[in-house]
């Protein structure tokens, strides 16, 4: 709804802009996906948003774990309690089946998403920016001084070595397939992959207890 949308964005009239953009995408038959982050202020509408996405024929996904900015943590005022997040998963049969499938999949790898090896951002300063995915990565690339392909090839080589040597607490976890946590997320939230993110670990443990 308009009220909930603008409580989340904190911007007046942003709902009308969102609706206009959505209508333009549909009108011009541009393929897209709807995504939402579940919070205290919009949790009552998450499954309604999913129904809306199905009605207009687009893919939908939602997430409960807020990604903090570098060096900061998520606010407890907006994040949902771990048990409530898992209960929402159970209400969504598709999401629950995906969680069960994760539980059955024991073949999990460190830094498994590979995102920094297949995509990147270029920030306003001309820097090839992957630090939102690996905040402690020690190398910096600026495409104003070097060719993009040269930067990319050098980066992918160094990042693969960094990824294999990184010392993350997740390596010792017995249930990584039930967790939304990644070593990159630890870096973003605390600047260190060694710091425990109890919130996400608690969600994984609740899932494990339910599946056991």
Image (spheres, rainbow, N blue to C red):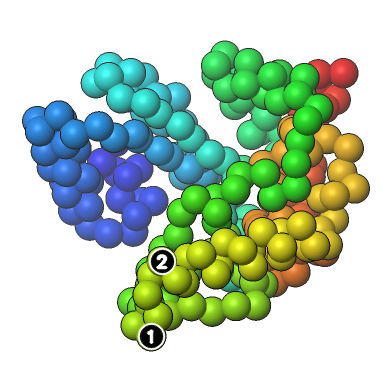
Frontmost residue, 44 versus 189 = 189
Q: Which residue is mark 2?
A: 149
Crowding at dot 1, Cα within 10 Å, few <14 / some 14-19 / many 20+, comes out as few
Label drawn at residue 145 = 1
Position above or below: 115 against 27: below
* Residue 70 at x, y percent in the picture: 58, 70
Q: Residue at x 76, y 36 (%)?
A: 108
Q: Residue at x 13, y 42 (%)?
A: 20
Position above or below: 67 against 209: below
Q: Is 198 placed left or right of 69 in the picture?
A: right
* Disc 1 from disc 2: Cα separation: 12 Å
* Residue 179 at x, y percent in the picture: 72, 39
Q: Is 21 placed left or right of 195 in the picture?
A: left
Q: Is residue 29 visible?
A: yes
Q: Is residue 52 visible?
A: no
Quadrant assignment, res 186: bottom right
Report how many numbered discs are placed on residues in the image. 2
Frontmost residue, 73 versus 162 = 162
Mark 1 lies on a secondary structure that is loop
Label drawn at residue 189 = none
Frontmost residue, 190 versus 37 = 190
Quadrant occupied by the C terminus: top right
Quadrant assignment, res 100: top right
């Amino acid at each position: 709804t308009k009220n909930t949308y603008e409580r989340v964005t904190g911007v007046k009239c942003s709902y009308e802009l969102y609706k206009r953009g959505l209508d333009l995408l549909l009108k011009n038959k541009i393929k897209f996906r709807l995504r939402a982050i579940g919070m205290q202020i919009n949790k009552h509408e998450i499954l309604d948003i999913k129904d809306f996405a199905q009605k207009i024929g687009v893919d939908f996904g939602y997430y409960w774990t807020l990604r903090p900015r570098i060096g900061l943590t998520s606010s407890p005022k907006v994040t949902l309690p771990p048990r409530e997040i898992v209960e929402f998963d159970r209400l969504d049969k598709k999401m629950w089946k995906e969680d069960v499938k994760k539980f059955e999949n024991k073949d999990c790898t460190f830094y498994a998403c590979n995102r920094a090896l297949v995509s990147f951002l270029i920030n306003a300063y001309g820097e090839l920016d992957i630090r939102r995915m690996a905040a402690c990565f020690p190398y910096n690339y600026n495409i104003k001084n070097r060719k993009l392909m040269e930067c990319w090839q050098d980066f992918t080589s160094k990042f693969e070595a960094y990824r294999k040597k990184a010392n993350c607490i997740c390596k010792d976890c017995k249930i990584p397939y039930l967790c939304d946590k990644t070593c990159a997320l630890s870096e973003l939230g605390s600047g260190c992959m060694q710091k425990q993110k109890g919130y996400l670990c608690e969600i994984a443990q609740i899932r494990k207890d339910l599946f056991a």
